[in-house]
């Protein structure tokens, strides 16, 4: 009877722990992790992807790791954390452009217009929503989702299924990578900040020279028009900024799973 129990346990372990990692990644991944994707559809995607990648990942053995033991529970938690960490790296890509769009909107007076963000379910400026949709389309067009799925498969080789494969060093690297997100967002919005600084400085001189001018009513309209021109001009550098941020996130994700990002992705 004990011999017969080993076979179903091996079968459960061979798909349960990879499913936890894949499901955690899709739960936090850009595009699939938003509220616009139903949880049932996300679960079916995780199960389908897990079945497809099973022949490409190392086999999971239960000789020293029982699924329903204490170490098995720790392994399940560890697999979910690894998957969520890889998925969060893609969220950094999306939130970089959201933050840049919000900074541009607040500087140009376009921040009063807001819509419901389909990813987070909260209100966000329209400019940030525009950059979110644009970055989503470009991310899918350049097969960014396939790149991160490939790295998810690679993670099973460099971070095999175990209860100690992901430590505090990896978590700290993941958290502190958020500084790069704000740095990239500020570098994309710095042109709008400088332009609006010149515009506000000009209105300050006009108010000083001619106090009878109603700078508040005229300045708001001019700021919006200049902001639209700045927004249109910033689209010329969108692909360059997207390429820089995507390469930075791919490199950081490869370092997170323990590889050097050599070879085609």
Image (cartoon, grey):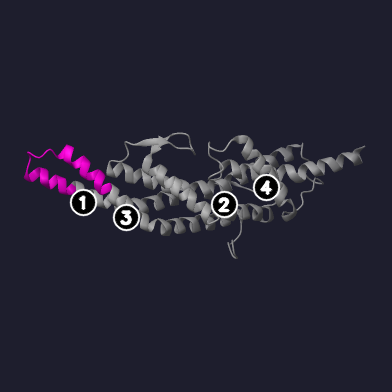
Q: Which residue lies at the image location 34% right of the left edge and 45% below the top edge?
A: 103
Q: Residue furthest right?
A: 1
Label 1 crowding class (10 Å Cα cut-off): few <14, some 14-19, many 20+? few
Mark 3 or mark 1: whose residue is earlier in sequence: 1
Asked whether 4 or 104 is in front, the reply is: 104
Q: Secondary structure at mark 3?
A: helix
Spot occupied by residue 201 in the image (x, y as percentages of width and height): 17, 48
Q: Is residue 256 above or below residue 47?
A: below
Instruction: Look at the image and say whether residue 256 sits in the magenta stretch.
Output: no
Label 3 – label 4 distance at C-alpha:
40 Å
Residue bearing the label numbered 4 = 49
> Which quadrant of the view contains residue 65?
top right
Instruction: Specify the quadrant that holds the N terminus.
Output: top right
Label 3 – label 2 distance at C-alpha:
28 Å
Residue bearing the label numbered 1 = 198
Q: Give residue 37's mark.
A: none
- The magenta region covers 201-227
Spot occupied by residue 94 in the image (x, y as percentages of width and height): 47, 47
Numbered marks: total: 4
Residue bearing the label numbered 2 = 145
Q: Is residue 85 above or below residue 150?
A: above
Q: Which residue lies at the image location 23% right of the left edge and 44% below the top edge?
A: 223
Label 4 crowding class (10 Å Cα cut-off): few <14, some 14-19, many 20+? some
Q: Give residue 233's mark.
A: 3
């Amino acid at each position: 009877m004990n011999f017969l129990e080993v076979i179903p346990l091996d079968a459960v372990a061979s798909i349960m722990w990879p499913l936890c990692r894949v499901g955690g990644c899709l739960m936090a991944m850009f595009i699939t992790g938003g509220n616009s994707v139903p949880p049932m559809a996300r679960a079916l995607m995780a199960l389908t992807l897990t079945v497809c990648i099973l022949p490409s990942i190392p086999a999971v053995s239960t000789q020293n790791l029982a699924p329903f033991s204490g170490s098995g529970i720790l392994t399940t938690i560890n697999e979910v954390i690894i998957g969520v960490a890889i998925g969060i790296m893609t969220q950094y890509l999306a939130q970089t452009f959201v933050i840049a769009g919000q900074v541009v909107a607040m500087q140009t007076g376009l921040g009063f217009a807001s819509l419901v963000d389909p990813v987070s379910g909260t209100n966000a400026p329209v400019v940030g929503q525009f950059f979110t949709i644009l970055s989503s389309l470009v991310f899918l067009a350049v097969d960014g989702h396939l790149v991160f799925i490939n790295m998810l498969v690679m993670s099973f080789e460099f971070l095999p299924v175990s209860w100690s494969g992901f430590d505090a060093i990896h978590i700290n690297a993941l958290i502190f990578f958020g500084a790069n997100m704000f740095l990239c967002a500020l570098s994309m919005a710095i042109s709008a900040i400088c332009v609006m600084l010149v515009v506000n400085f000009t209105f300050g001189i006009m108010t000083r020279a001619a106090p009878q001018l109603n700078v508040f009513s005229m300045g708001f309209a001019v700021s919006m028009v200049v902001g639209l021109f700045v927004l249109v001009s910033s689209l010329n550098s969108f692909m360059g900024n997207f390429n820089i941020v995507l390469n930075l996130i791919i490199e950081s994700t490869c370092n997170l799973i323990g590889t050097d990002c050599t070879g085609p992705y």
